[in-house]
Image: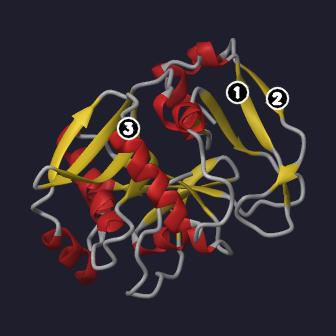
């Protein structure tokens, strides 16, 4: 596959991890392909890697590399082809009062408190809580062009979306929000806001990470159509059945 800026990738090497438990499919082993050394993966190199199906976690770029499973499909939304559904238009109008601001990656206690509460709600309180150091390594470190998008209502923090800006689009890394507000549609609004931001920046794609048909965590991605998937090394239109109208975005993550 020919990539823009491919000359920036020639010094990068790729290593497969050892097998570990898959975080999306129960009782499945998983492996990842890691691009190294991470200090050479700058904005230009990452723009090439993301077109090859890579994602970012902290300073590390990776993609699934499982021998016996190919369930993870990198997906992106063609910005100019997207048409919101009625439920998505309602979510957009519902949260137009949110105040949005862009900021550089940085750690704040306010962000970490919202993230921690979101993780507890998302995992039903099970598992050990993540530490501030784990949060920093995951979302506050980056070698590429990354930003935090804050969403506030009357000054109160409601949602934070961590994104990467690449040559041909925006990549949604992770989003966390006030999960206690069960009447809100924050996740849906976030995706719609990012699509609008792509239009303003004249960027053609919004990258949503991986879609896994059997994973409930990934079900929200079926609500945003049309989509392109990276299949056999080529980005192409894919057809997936939309989720139920009541389904809400659980998270914007890889």
Front-most of residues 180 and 225: 180
Give neighbour class at mark 1: few <14, some 14-19, many 20+ (Cα, 10 Å).
Answer: many
Mark 2 sits on what residue? 15
Mark 3 sits on what residue? 109
Q: Is residue 241 left or right of residue 72?
A: left
- At x 26%, y 82%, the residue is 87
The secondary structure type at the circle numbered 1 is strand
Across and down, in percent, residue 38 comes to 64, 19
Which label's residue is closer to the chain start, 3 or 2? 2
Q: Do the residues labelled 1 and 3 touch (CB within 8 Å)?
A: no
- At x 37%, y 43%, the residue is 111
Across and down, in percent, residue 176 comes to 41, 54
The secondary structure type at the circle numbered 3 is helix
- At x 34%, y 62%, the residue is 178
Mark 1 sits on what residue? 35
- At x 69%, y 60%, the residue is 127
The secondary structure type at the circle numbered 2 is strand
Across and down, in percent, residue 130 comes to 60, 46
Q: Residue 229, relative to residue 173: is it above or below?
A: below
User: How many numbered discs, if any?
Assistant: 3
Q: In this view, does 83 lie to the left or right of 224?
A: left
Quadrant of residue 134 in the image? top right
Give me the C-alpha separation between circle 1 and circle 2.
Answer: 7 Å
Across and down, in percent, residue 141 comes to 50, 26
Q: Nearer the viewer, mark 1 or mark 3?
A: 3
Which label's residue is closer to the chain start, 1 or 2? 2
Q: Is residue 162 left or right of residue 101?
A: right
Front-most of residues 4 and 67: 67
């Amino acid at each position: 596959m020919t990539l823009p800026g491919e000359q920036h990738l020639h010094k990068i090497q790729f290593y497969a991890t050892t097998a570990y438990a898959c975080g999306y499919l129960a009782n499945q082993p998983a492996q990842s392909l890691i691009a190294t050394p991470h200090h050479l993966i700058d904005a230009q190199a990452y723009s090439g890697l993301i077109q090859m199906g890579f994602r970012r976690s902290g300073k590390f770029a990776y993609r699934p590399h499982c021998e016996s499973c190919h369930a993870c499909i990198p997906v992106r939304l063609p910005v100019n082809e997207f048409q919101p559904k009625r439920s998505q238009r309602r979510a957009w109008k519902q949260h137009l009062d949110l105040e949005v601001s862009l900021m550089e990656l940085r750690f704040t206690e306010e962000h970490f408190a919202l993230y921690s509460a979101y993780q507890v709600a998302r995992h039903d309180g099970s598992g050990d809580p993540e530490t501030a150091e784990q949060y920093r390594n995951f979302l506050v470190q980056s070698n590429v062009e990354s930003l935090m998008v804050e969403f506030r209502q009357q000054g109160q923090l409601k949602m934070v979306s961590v994104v990467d800006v690449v040559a041909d689009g925006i990549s949604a890394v992770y989003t966390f929000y006030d999960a206690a507000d069960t009447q809100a549609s924050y996740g849906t609004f976030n995706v719609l806001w990012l699509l609008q931001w792509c239009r303003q920046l004249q960027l053609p794609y919004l990258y949503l990470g991986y879609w896994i048909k059997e994973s409930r965590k990934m079900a929200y991605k079926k609500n945003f159509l049309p989509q392109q998937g990276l299949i056999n090394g080529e980005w192409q239109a894919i057809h997936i059945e939309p989720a139920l109208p009541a389904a809400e975005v659980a998270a914007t993550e890889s």
